[in-house]
């Protein structure tokens, strides 16, 4: 199961026939923290933080369908609702009633869909370098362009172009190892999985209402220099239940760029 593109060491077959690979730190007596990775990522996006976080929670990090070690299932758009229902099916198989759910980028869009469709399964949730805003018309065009590029040239050149855009500009030279690691993780994405994710993100609706209406504890974590989703698109709401964090010096990949600060932010949220 384990490979260089994923840290998943388990696999589960869902009632819908989908197979999902996942990492599980295994502390059965602790509350459960589920981490959802971003586009062209895998559970390995969290490899620098899972050991520290596992001191506070049972950490589960799935590979979304078509990414990491989870095989693709079908062509066309993989909607955020589809991913959310995959996760609900996985939690059912693992006999886990409620979780704290944090999603990075694409994983954040899935988290919002999950909070909308399965609120009874949540103790708390949060967005990591993500936003409840829908795609702009320009962004929707870019999703189509991404799908076309992957169909034409495959995943490797697409990932080589994508990954440097995810890091804060100053970190491209100082964090060369992490940038290259993110590329290797990305190479593990199936073409159908990447295309499905791109088209699914294009379709996602505005979910600001999910944040406005929830009474659950909510974490909004942004990168100071995020070139993909600026902090103001993440930090869209305030309230007694809301924890806002800006990771200094981080771009779109805080868990790789600033892992210690990231762990502090998440554990502070969990301990609340």
Image (cartoon, rainbow, N blue to C red):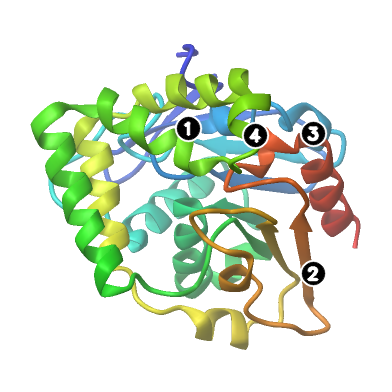
Q: Quadrant of residue 156?
A: top left
Which quadrant: the N terminus? top left
Q: In the displayed structure, does residue 166 sit left or right of residue 243? A: left
**Residue of label 1:** 42
| Nearer to the camera, 191 or 164 | 164
Q: Residue at x 83, y 55 (%)?
A: 270
| Within-10-Å neighbours for mark 3: few <14, some 14–19, many 20+ | some
- Residue 171: give its label: 4
User: Quick check: 226 above or below 45?
Assistant: below
- At mark 3, the secondary structure is loop
Where is residue 74 drawn, in percent x and y? 15, 42
Q: Which residue is mark 2?
A: 243
Q: Which is nearer the N-term, disc 3 or disc 4?
A: 3
Residue at horizontal 53 percent and vertical 20 percent from the top: 181
Which residue is rendered at x = 24% and y = 65% of the image? 140
**In the shown orientation, is residue 160 left or right of residue 103?**
left
Distance CA(mark 3)–CA(mark 4): 27 Å
On screen, 26 above or below 128? above
Residue 254 lies in quadrant: top right
Residue 7 location (% of width, % of height):
56, 21
**Left or right of 178 on screen, residue 26:** right
Lower sequence index among marks 4 and 1: 1
Dot 4: element: helix
């Amino acid at each position: 199961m384990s490979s260089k593109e994923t840290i998943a060491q388990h696999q589960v077959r869902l009632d819908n026939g989908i197979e999902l690979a996942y990492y599980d730190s295994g502390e059965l007596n602790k509350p459960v923290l589920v981490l959802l990775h971003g586009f062209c990522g895998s559970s390995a996006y969290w490899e620098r933080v899972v050991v520290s976080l596992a001191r506070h929670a049972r950490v589960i990090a799935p590979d979304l369908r078509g990414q990491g070690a989870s095989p693709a299932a079908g062509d066309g758009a993989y909607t955020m609702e589809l991913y959310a229902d995959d996760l609900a099916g996985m939690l059912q198989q693992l006999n886990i009633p409620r979780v704290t759910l944090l999603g990075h980028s694409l994983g954040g869009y899935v988290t919002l869909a999950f909070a909308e469709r399965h609120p009874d399964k949540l103790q708390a949730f949060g967005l990591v370098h993500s936003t409840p805003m829908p795609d702009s018309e320009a962004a929707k065009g870019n999703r189509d362009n991404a799908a076309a590029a992957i169909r034409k040239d495959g995943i490797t050149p697409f990932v080589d172009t994508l990954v440097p855009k995810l890091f804060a500009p100053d970190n491209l030279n100082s964090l060369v190892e992490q940038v290259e690691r993110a590329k290797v993780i990305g190479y593990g994405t199936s073409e159908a999985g990447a295309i499905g994710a791109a088209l699914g993100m294009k379709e996602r609706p505005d979910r600001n209402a999910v944040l406005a209406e929830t009474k659950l504890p909510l974490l909004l974590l942004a990168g100071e220099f995020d070139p993909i989703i600026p902090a103001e698109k993440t930090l869209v709401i305030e309230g007694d239940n809301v924890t806002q964090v800006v990771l200094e010096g981080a771009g779109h990949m805080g868990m790789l760029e600033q892992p210690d600060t990231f762990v502090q932010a998440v554990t502070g949220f969990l301990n609340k």
